[in-house]
Image (spheres, grey):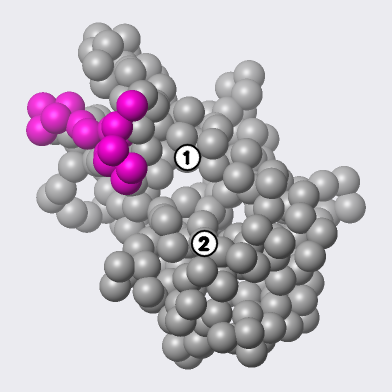
Amino acid sequence: MSEKGDAAPEIRARPFGNAPHGAAGVALSAEQRHALARIARLVHFAHGQTIYLQGDPLTHVYTLAAGVVATYRMNDEGVRHITALLFPGDCFGVAEAGRYFNAAEAVTEAEAWQIPFRELAALLEADPRLEWNFLVKALDGVRQAQRHAILLDRHGAVQRIALFLEYLRREMPANGGRIVPLPMSRSVIADYTGLSLESVSRSLSALRDAGAIRMEGPHAVEVLDPARLREAAEG
């Protein structure tokens, strides 16, 4: 883990109130970003590096600057269940009774702003608008958790993978949504969707054979027929 960078933290979230589709719900002012930068440091995490473990004492909150991070919980049998995939502009460090509620791991090389919890709490108390922006971000996280629950409730593997690709199209738009990056490993996709590695591969192949997508190597998908992909996602 190393310190670097001369930028400032940013968070992103979809609108809480009425706003045009796709409009930013969170826009930190330059003053707010600089205030966060004064108490934070930008740290680098290697691919596969643990950021914190479930049950560790709460020390920092993080905003992701680059890369992809997964949060996860371990069940009693030691099986990992990914609870969220996080992208630049997302926050993580959810805690309960002063301890992290889940674990966090960099699933690609990643950079994040590490913000001391006590200093952040004082800053939010002093700036109600900044506190509101973090609240909007927290509510955006609730929406993402609900979408993940809907995905896991789907019985068909192809439908789950189609929903996952639609999710990535929203979170990491590239070429107008035509290209869907897949920077994470197939095992991470399997853990997030609750499928086996074999089911992930078969489902991607099924969507390819249906003409909905084309694989652009191991780390990207081209959406050939958005309507067909949506139809698969809707079951």
| Relative image position of residue 124 (x, y in whole percent) | 31, 16
Q: Which mark is residue 166?
A: 2
User: Could you tell whether 8 is left or right of 199 in the image?
Assistant: left
Crowd band around label 2 with a 10 angstrom C-alpha radius: few (<14), some (14–19), many (20+): some
Q: Residue at x 62, y 39 (%)?
A: 146
Q: Residue at x 78, y 72 (%)?
A: 196
* Foreground pick, 183 / 175: 175
User: Could you tell whether 207 is left or right of 30 in the image?
Assistant: right
| Relative image position of residue 169 (x, y in whole percent) | 44, 63
Quadrant of residue 21 within the rendered picture: top left
User: Could you tell whether 111 is left or right of 155 in the image?
Assistant: left
Mark 2 element type: helix
Q: Earlier in the sequence, mark 1 or mark 2?
A: 1
Crowd band around label 1 with a 10 angstrom C-alpha radius: few (<14), some (14–19), many (20+): many
Q: Which mark is residue 92?
A: 1
Quadrant of residue 44 within the rendered picture: bottom left
Q: Residue at x 56, y 70 (%)?
A: 229
Q: Is residue 21 magenta?
A: yes
Quadrant of residue 170 within the rendered picture: bottom left
* Foreground pick, 2 / 16: 16
Cα separation, mark 1 vs mark 2, equals: 22 Å
The segment highlighted magenta reads 18-32
In the image, residue 103 sits, relative to residue 169, either above or below, namely: above
Mark 1 element type: strand
Q: Nearer the viewer, mark 1 or mark 2?
A: 2
Give the amino acid type for the residue marked by disc 1 in the picture: Phe
Q: Quadrant of the N terminus?
A: bottom left
Give the amino acid type for the residue marked by disc 2 in the picture: Glu
Q: Is residue 157 magenta?
A: no
In the image, residue 138 sits, relative to residue 179, either above or below, namely: above
User: Could you tell whether 87 is left or right of 197 in the image?
Assistant: left
